[in-house]
Amino acid sequence: AAEGRADYAVAGAVVELRPRVGDDHEPEQAAGAVLYLALLDAHTGKVLWSDTADRSESGRGFFLHLYDRLMNDRPVRWHSAEEWSETVSDGLVKKLVREVD
């Protein structure tokens, strides 16, 4: 918002990255990410919109393993924390665009 030229500012933060523990195909613990995104009035600093998103694959283990056995010749690779952070940030930006559109 240098010299008052911008009306809005976007701020974001990685709140938590949970690394995958174990093998890429059958981890002991799934990876995950928590991100925060906010739209600010650049003149006042007031938060106009904000959201936090938390995503992981922790619930997919049993069903994915069963699906792999029935449909695939190889196991499906689980996402890393970094991959989840990209997915989560994409989702938050899409929500922000819908909100201001």
Image (cartoon, rainbow, N blue to C red):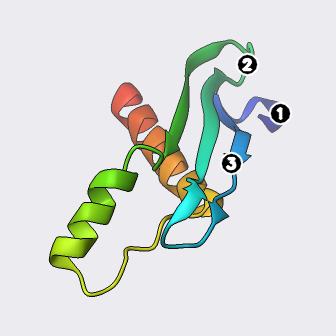
Residue at horizontal 33 percent and vertical 53 percent from the top: 62
| Residue 12, numbered label | none
Residue 30 lies, in percent from the top left, at 55, 53
Of 52 and 93, the residue lying toward us: 52
Instruction: Rate crowding at label 1 as few (under 14), some (14 to 19) or many (20 or more) other CA atoms within 10 Å.
Output: few
Asked if labels 2 and 3 touch by Cβ distance under 8 angstroms, the answer is no
Residue 51 lies, in percent from the top left, at 54, 25
Amino acid type at mark 2: His
**Measured Cα–Cα span from mark 1 to mark 3:** 39 Å
Q: Is residue 88 above or below residue 27?
A: above
Q: Which residue, given by chain and number where applicable, does mark 1 sit on?
A: 3
Left or right for 7, reference 66: right
Q: Quadrant of residue 46?
A: top right
Amino acid type at mark 1: Glu
Provide the secondary structure element on which disc 2 rests: loop
Q: Earlier in the sequence, mark 1 or mark 3?
A: 1
Q: Which quadrant: the N terminus?
A: top right
Provide the secondary structure element on which disc 3 rests: strand
**Measured Cα–Cα span from mark 3 to mark 2:** 35 Å
Asked if labels 1 and 2 touch by Cβ distance under 8 angstroms, the answer is no
Q: Nearer the viewer, mark 2 or mark 1?
A: 2
Q: Which residue, given by chain and number where applicable, does mark 2 sit on?
A: 43
Q: Which quadrant: the C terminus?
A: top left
